[in-house]
Amino acid sequence: MNNATTNTGCPISRRTFVQGAVATAAAVGASGAFGFDIAHAEGTIDTSKPVEKRHTYCDMCNQVPKCGLTAYVQDDKIVRVESRTPHPTTPLCAKGMASIQELYDPNRLTKPLRRTNAKGTGKSEWEEITWDEAYATIASEFNRVKDEYGADAVMFYCGDPKEPRPAIQRVATLFGTSSYGNESSLCSQATQICSQLVFGRGLVTMGVDPTEDTGSCTIWTLNAAWSQPNRHGKFLDQKERGCKFVVVDPRITPTVTGLADVHLQLRPGTDGALALGFINILIRDNLIDQEFVDEWTHGFEGLAELAAQYPPEKVEEITWVPAAKLEEAAHLLAENAPTTMITSAAGMAHSSNVGHALRAIFMIPALLGSIEKKGGMLFPAGSLPFDTAASTTQFRERELYAKEKFEERRVDREDFPVWVSFSDHFQTAYLPEYVDEGKIRAGMLIAANAMIWPETNRYQEALSKLEFAAAVDYYERPWTHDYVDILLPAAMCHERMAPFAVYGRKMILREPCVTPAGEAREDWQIMLELGCALGFEEECFGGSVEEAIKYILETADIGVTLEDMRANPDGVDVPGPEQQENKHTVGRIRRDGEVGFNTPSGKIEFDSEVLKNFGYEGLPVYEEPVHSPLNATGEDAKYPLVLNTGGRVPFYTHSKLREIPWLNQFMPDPIVRLHPQDASARGINDGDEVRIFNWQNEVVMKAEITNMVLPGVIDVFHGWSKANINLLTTRDFDPITGFPPFRCGLCEVERVS
Ligand SMILES: Nc1nc2c(c(=O)[nH]1)N[C@H]1C(S)=C(S)[C@@H](COP(=O)(O)OP(=O)(O)OC[C@H]3O[C@@H](n4cnc5c(=O)[nH]c(N)nc54)[C@H](O)[C@@H]3O)O[C@H]1N2
Ligand SMILES: Nc1nc2c(c(=O)[nH]1)N[C@H]1C(S)=C(S)[C@@H](COP(=O)(O)OP(=O)(O)OC[C@H]3O[C@@H](n4cnc5c(=O)[nH]c(N)nc54)[C@H](O)[C@@H]3O)O[C@H]1N2
Ligand SMILES: [Mo]
């Protein structure tokens, strides 16, 4: 199928635009014109009493833009929230504004609970217990499993929330287990690994946003308008200044309509072929920076041979992107080199061939000589010594991890050796297998959600088979907590201190704005107290979060103390080195101080020596998604629609926030977006109930008919407990990264009569 005629000028459906606009209006109303009205909370601002303004940062989207939030506090209660200004990331989106409704939701967990009926046998029943009882039970179960099977049989796991992670990793390492995992197993780590393979350095530490020097920016997946709104604002500023944008996305999103000079609307999962198409044109038309390529890259001849097999016409057949559009995009990038940069995100990483596809994408700016150039892809120099959740390697006990050779014992060693080389947390893809093989027998699940894995039922089964599991969350989530023995209440962002925030070279302390609800405690406190119960009283600072932060500041060794941060609530600026171009030419990129890049060849690797060493193909070969509509045979031929899942919506984060009145009004029910052609071929009208099914399972949702999606592709948001689309996604993991193909499965849709 060729969509040259169908994807031109189709506006996004009016309904979708209106939804976004209303979400914004509600957020403004929440703090502005309509005053205070929290559906769940009691009270409004009592003007006869003093109101104190306190500051924190929001974590409603689990991410790390850490948008500034100002809380108005009366009698230890937050009565209003608004954006903190000035602040490095502002303003708050609709989710941040609505955070007050989650904070005061009467359904929040407020007491530690112990199960009184059998796991996974219907509705959970619980009894209240004290924190001391909870810690004592967890410690005794973990120590029992450790004594019988070794520490690695105890898993510590954290979901998408980043804030709790340093404390979890510290306690896991002190306890002695190499089985620490987190949701990066299907989020950002594929990008990190592919960037490491090509450049010898992870992309998070690279300047992945356009700057005022950038001539062209390719947004290869990423719908920041909905997934990171204040980052989108920065893209819009660059657009206004004159930066040109290419957007690669199968859907017509607000990011596309707001930014794209060229939109490449590809079939999901075909990014690798599209990237080779770019490379083909750049080489064919002599648009590459031959001098840079000769001096600083490795494997060019092989790459050129591979790309020669992907002329634009063939790429059109595979990807459905019109050849003329691909030509236009490739030339636009070349015209702006070396101030050409590419940014990417999870959207395209969810495919069974991401390990090669993402590498091919990263090779494009390298061919154009845009690496280590201002306005291109510049590795920052001299970053502060903190990770995304503001902790140091000393705090996370990385020395102990290395000294005790945890890496050699990791459960994922055999399955994902490349992953193991670049990640100090295990790839959770084969968790069900590890449980079945007896390698993992107990678990501590912080901010975990079983519904995020493909074939969710396999993971729920695995959790229920654990000899013992405890979870920490804001809410009881039956789809996960029906399989645990103990459930602990977590304090929300407005109620906690750790971690502080780091924005470039600015550090801002967080202090709790109010006392936590009921007996809820913040994740760091819970982990440190558990660490004490496990016998690490001194290493866990007697359970004190404040002492932990002092230790982090001490080990960062940058001369900033807790007192300094308290004295400067708007932030402490730490002076740093100037940005510098071409650092690879003066030995400032490689760890050993030699010139070049931190790869085995010392160069940017088109042909990966690391991959070849592990027996993989070194060049970025293209492979069709495991279940593809092209030449489908057998069972696959019965399911002609591409199943594209997980495209973010502005008002929900994964499975979260469905309970928030200010947010759930915009999408009260799960919807599936279908192109008008596919809908009419199946007699489906807008708003009809439809069955989405494949060989694995089925779910029921409402149809939304829209030109936002390509014909032949359907779009479904994940995280609905009443219609979990991950019952239909498959465990066909990418062999290099272990990532699942959330974005490119197969299915059929029919009307529920
Ligand atoms: N089909 C499909 N599946 C996907 C994706 C997709 O695109 N398509 N995307 C994948 C990606 S990129 C990701 S990151 C994952 C998301 O994976 P998860 O993070 O596992 O998803 P959430 O639904 O946000 O679940 C977080 C849970 O933690 C709780 N929680 C939130 N914040 C905190 C906190 O600070 N402390 C504690 N103790 N609890 C907290 C919430 O109440 C919720 O129950 O989903 C993945 N799954
Ligand atoms: N409101 C909200 N914000 C969030 C989240 C949330 O749940 N809700 N989740 C957070 C998390 S954990 C993450 S990882 C980020 C994700 O951030 P984004 O990557 O921006 O999120 P998505 O909307 O999942 O994907 C971006 C785009 O990728 C496109 N896409 C889908 N399949 C393909 C493909 O095969 N190839 C290409 N090139 N593009 C494809 C989709 O159409 C979508 O428009 O968002 C974060 N921000
Ligand atoms: Mo993610």
Image (cartoon, rainbow, N blue to C red):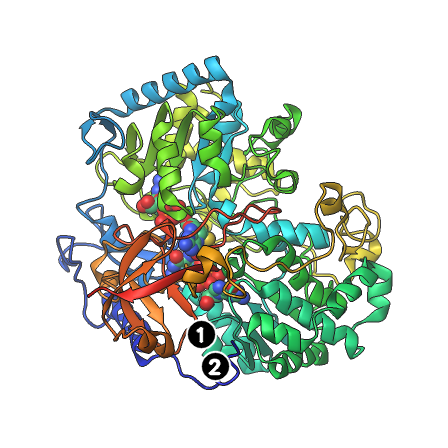
* Residue 470 relative to residue 354: left or right: left
Q: Position of residue 485 (x, y in %)?
A: 29, 27
Task: Specify whether 43 is left or right of 561.
Answer: left
Residue 301 visible somewhere in the drawing:
yes
Residue located at (18% from left, 63% from top): 36
Residue 242 falls left or right of residue 115: right
Mark 2, residue position = 7
Number of numbered discs overlaid on the protein picture: 2
- Residue 425: % across, % down: 55, 37
**Residue 84 x, y percent position in the rendering:** 38, 61
Q: Indicate the quadrant where residue 69 lies.
A: bottom left
Q: Is mark 2 within 8 Å of ligand 2?
A: no
Residue 549 appears anywhere in the view: no
Residue in the image at 58% along x and 30% along y: 410
Q: Dot 2: within a 10 Å radius of its alpha carbon, few (fewer than 14), some, or many (20 or more) residues?
A: many
Instruction: Provide residue 680's location: percent of width, then percent of height.
Output: 32, 78
- Going by the numbered disc 2, the residue's amino acid type is Asn
Q: Which residue is mark 1?
A: 710
* Quadrant of the snapshot with the C terminus: bottom left
Asked whether the residues under the numbered discs 1 and 2 touch, taking CB atoms below 8 Å apart as contact, a structural biologist would say yes
Element at label 1: loop
Label 2, secondary structure: give it.
loop
The CA span between labels 1 and 2 is 7 Å
Horizontal relation, residue 66 to residue 375: left or right: left
Query: Which residue is at 20% across, 26% downward?
Result: 117
Which amino acid, by three-letter code, is at mark 1? Answer: Leu
